[in-house]
Image (cartoon, helix red, strand yellow):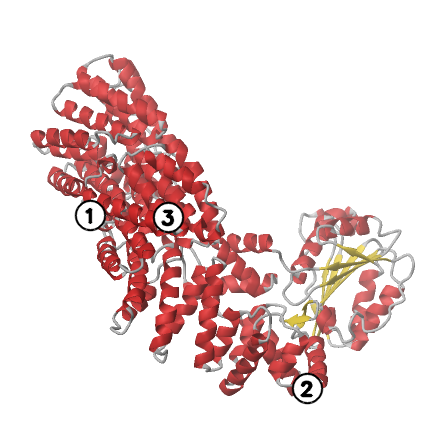
Amino acid sequence: MSTLSDATWERWLKQSLAHAGQQPALLLVEGVAGVGKSRLVQRLLEAAEAGSRPSVLLTFASAGVTLAHRPAPEAARPAAASPAARVGRVTPPPPPRVHSDAVALAEDLAPLLEAGGPVLLVAEDVHRADGDSRELLRRLLEQPPAGLATVLAYRPEELPEPGLVLGGTVHYPARLSVLRLRLAPLDPQEVRELVEERLGAEACPPELVARIHERSGGVPQVVVDLVRQLEDVCGPRERYTAKDVDATGPPVRLAELVLGRLAALADDGRAVVAAAAVLDEPAAAEDLYAVASLPPDYGRQALVAALAGAVLQERGQDLYGFPAPLAGDAVYRELPGPLRQAMHRRAGDVLAHRQPVPYPRLAAHRRHAGQLRGWLRAVEQAAQQCAEAGEHQSAIDLLEQALSHPAVPQQMRARLAPLLAHSAVLALHTEQTVQVLRQILDDESLPEAVRGQIRLDLGLVLYNQAGMGLQGWVELEQAVDELAERPPLAARAMSALAMPVMSSVPLERNLYWLERARSTAAASGDAEVRAAVAANCIAVLLETGDPEAWDVLEELRADTADPDRLQHVARGLVNAADAVLWLGYLPRVGDLLEEGLELAARSGASYVEQDGRGSSLMLDWVSGRWEGLAARARAFVAETAVMPGPAADARVVLGLLSLAQGEWQQMAAWLAGEGRPLSHVAPLPHAATASGALIRTALARDDLETAAAEAAAAWDRLRDKGVWAWAAELAPWAVEATARAGRRPAAEEMIAEYEAGLKGRMGPAAEAALHWSRGVLADAEEDHAQAAEHYRRANALYAEMPRPYAQILTSEAAAEAALASGDDVEAAVEELVGCVQLLSDLGAGWDAARVRATLRAHQPAETQRPRGRPSYGDQLSPREQEVIDLASSGLTNREIATTLHLSPRTVEQHVARARRKLESQSRQELSRGRTGRAR
C-alpha cells in the first residue's frame, strides 16, 4: 500500500478513470475531524463530472446511509440513449435516497455499478458505517468491477477497530490499486492564506496568524470557524490582534465535538483530559498523571482511553495534548472551580521541578491556584526571564497583572515596579502601565533611588509611546534630582531631556541637557549608559546640523556584540533615520531603517520597531510609493492606537493622502479629529506638517482668515522651539497664507526668520522649502519671473532627493508663474499637461483636477473644442465626470467650484445632470464604483 500526498490526488483520479476498464482503484482518505475530507470529496466529484464520468456518493450517519447518484453528463452519452438530449432538455440527477439497512443499499447500488464503464464511488464518513455496511464495502472491494474507482473517507481516530477502515482485514485482489492519502493540518503559510482570504491581508499581522495557527492546530475547519467567530465577536476592524483570538474562545463546533468525546470516557479518563486542559501544552504522561492525581497504572489506562476516544493525541515523543489547543479551552471552561484550583496547584508543583523552570507558565499556575506568595516569586523570575529574552511585552503583561492586585505587599511592589518600568520603555505603551507606575510613585515609603528609577522609565514612556511630551519632561527633570546618587541612570534621564522632538521647551534647554548627559555618561564608566546616551545624541546633533552625528553613529554601530547594548544601537539607527528623513537626505533613510528594525526585532525593543515602521510609512509618502500606502497606514493606526507617538506618522500620511485625493473630510479627521489635533499633540515635525496641510485646504477654500491664523500659530510654535529644519513642510503654505491675507511684511519676516534659523543647519528639504517660499512671495509681489526661478531651484532639489509630489507641485508653480509673466506660454502649458499626467499616475486626483482647470484657461485656440455643446447622450461629459469624482471624494459644491475655477451654481448644474445620467445607468453607483454626495 502506498501513500499519496494531497498534491497528487487529481492525478490519481485521472489515471484511475482513464484505466478503469483495465484496473480498479481504491483511494483511502483519512484525516481528523475538520481537516478537509469533505472538501476533498467534493472536489473529487467535481473532477469526475468534469471528466464526464458518473459518480455515486455514499454518506454514512447514525440514521443510515444516503446514496446520491450523479449520472454522466448528457453530452457524454450516445444521442439515441436520451430523448431529453435530442430536444435540448437537461435531465436533473435523481434525488438522494436514504437507506437504513445494508440490504436495501446493496439493491440500490448494484445496478449503478454494473452498468458498465468507469464509475467513481465515494463513501464519506466510513467510520460511522454499521457492521453490515462495512461488510458490503469489503465484499465490493474484494471483487471490484473493472470500471470502479473507489474513495473511502474517514476519521482514523473514530474507527471501531484502530487502523482497520472497514473493521477487519480486506483481501484486496492483486489487480486493485490501493493508495492512502493522509490529510495533514495546515502549515503556517496555508493558515495565513486562509485567514487573509476572509479578513484581508492588511487586517492580519504575523502575530495574529501565528496565534490562530497555534490555537487551531492548523485544522482547517477550526481555522474557518475561529475567523468567523473573530468577526462576529470583535466586529469589523482595520487590524486584528492575537489578544482578539484569545478573547473569542473556542468555536461551538469544536467545543461540542471534544465535550461529546469527553462524555464517553470514564472518570479517570476525564481526569487525564482535564489535566491536559489545565497544563495547556503538550505534556509528558507522568505529568498528566500527577496533575490528575492518578497512580501511574490507573493514569496509563486513563490516557490510553483518552487517546482511543480521540480526545487527546500524541504530540511528539512521549508528549500528549489536544489536536487543536482550543479544544482544551472548551474542556477547561467546564471544570468546577475547586477541581480547577487543585489541578493548578499540582501543575505548579510539576513545573517547579523542571530544569530550567518555565517561570511564566509557573506564575500562571500559582495565580490560578490562589498561591499569592508563590505567584509573586514566579512573576519576578518570569519577568526577568522574559526581559533577558527580549520578550518585554510578556514581562509587562505579567507585571501589570501582579502590581494591580490589591494584596501585593509593599516590599514586593518595590521589587516588581522597576522591572515593569524597564520593560515598558522598550515595549508597547498601555494606559494601565502608566496608571500602575503612577500609583507606585504615590507611595511615600518608596526609597528615593527606586522612585527615581521608576520615574525615569515613566517619563520615557510618556515622552515616547504616550505622546505626552510635557508630562514626560516634568517627570524626567524630577528623576534627575532623585537619581543624584546614581549617575548612570541620571545620565539617561538627561539624554531624554536633550531630545528636541517631543517637547516645546526651547532648543537651548535641550542642548544644555545634552552636554550634561554626555559628560555624566563619560564619567560613569558604564558602556551601556554611554550607548543609551549616544542613541539620543545622534538625533539631537542631526537635527541641529552638527556633522559629528555621523561619527557618533558609526561608533555606536560597532557596538552590536553586547546584547545589553543592542537595543540602544537599534534606537540610535531609527533615531538617525527619522532625523534625516525630515532633513531630506532620503537615500540614507532606507538603509538606516532596515538595519535599525532588524536590531530592534533581535533585541525585543517593540517600541523602537514600531517607531521605525512609522518612519517607513513617511518614507513611502515622500518617495511617492503611494500604492497600498493608505491601507498600510490605516492598519498601523489600528495597531498603535494606544501609542500616539508612532501613530502620528501614519495619521500624517493618511491626512496628506486624503488631501491630495480631495477627501478633505477624511483629511480633517486624520489631522485634527478625535479631540487630539496633531498640530497640538504630535511631535513638532508632524505638527508642522499637519498645519501645512490644514493651511493648504483653507487656502483652497479661499478661507484666508483661517489659513493665516493656522500659519501664525504653527510659526509661533517653531519659533519657540528653534529647530527651523522642521518648517520645511509648513513654510511655503504659511508664507502664502500670510501674503494672501494682506500681511506681506509679515510674510517677508517669516522668510527672513526661516533663513536665519537655518544658517549652518541647512538640509536639502529646508533649502528646497526656502526657495519655494521665496517663489510664493515673489508671486505675491507679481515678480513672476523671479518666482519661476525660485520654483525651478526648489524643483531641482526635490528631484535630487527625490520627492516626486513636491517636485510636481513646484513644477506646476513654475509653469503658472511663467504663464502669469507671459514668458514662453506654450512651454508652460506643455509642462502643466505633464503635471496632470504625473499627478494622476501618483494618485493625487484633486491636484490633477486643479491643474486641468488651470489648463482650460490657457489652452491654445486650436486645441479647444468647437463652439456649441457636444452631445454625450446618457454618458457623462468630461467636466461632469470631473465634478462627480470630486463630489465622490467628499468635497462640497463650493470646494469643487474653487478647485475647478467654476461658480457654485455651475457645479450644482453639473452634479444634477450627472445624477440623472447615472441613475438611468444604475441606481447603485455614483461614480466608477464609488458613492458620495455633493453638498
Identify which residue is drawn at 10% across, 40% down: 705
Mark 3 → mark 1, Cα distance in angstroms: 26 Å
Q: Is residue 199 above or below residue 864?
A: below
Mark nearer the viewer, 3 or 1: 3
Q: Quadrant of residue 401?
A: bottom left
Asked which secondary structure carries label 1, the reply is loop
Q: Secondary structure at mark 3?
A: helix
Residue 77, given in percent of the width and then of the height, sits at 77, 49
Horizontal and vertical percent for residue 116?
Answer: 85, 56
Q: Position of residue 19 (x, y in %)?
A: 84, 49
- The CA span between labels 3 and 2 is 58 Å
Farthest-out residue, right: 174
- Mark 1 and mark 2 lie on one chain; the one further toward the N terminus is 2
Q: Label 2 sits on what residue type? A: Pro
Q: Nearer the viewer, mark 3 or mark 2?
A: 3
Q: Amino acid at mark 1?
A: Ser
- Quick one: 269 or 836, which is closer to the camera? 269
Q: Secondary structure at mark 2?
A: loop
Write down the quadrant of residue 446 in the picture.
bottom left
| Residue 295 numbered tag | 2
Q: CA distance from mark 1 to mark 2?
A: 69 Å
Which residue is located at x 45 percent, y 66 percent? 383
| Disc 2: CA contacts within 10 A as few (<14), some (14-19) or many (>=20) | few
Answer above or below: position of 715 versus 565. Answer: above
| Left or right: residue 639 compared with residue 318 | left
Q: Which residue position holds label 1?
A: 504
- Compare marks 3 and 1 and give the one earlier in the sequence: 1
Which residue occupies 49% across, 51% down? 602
Q: Earlier in the sequence, mark 3 or mark 2?
A: 2
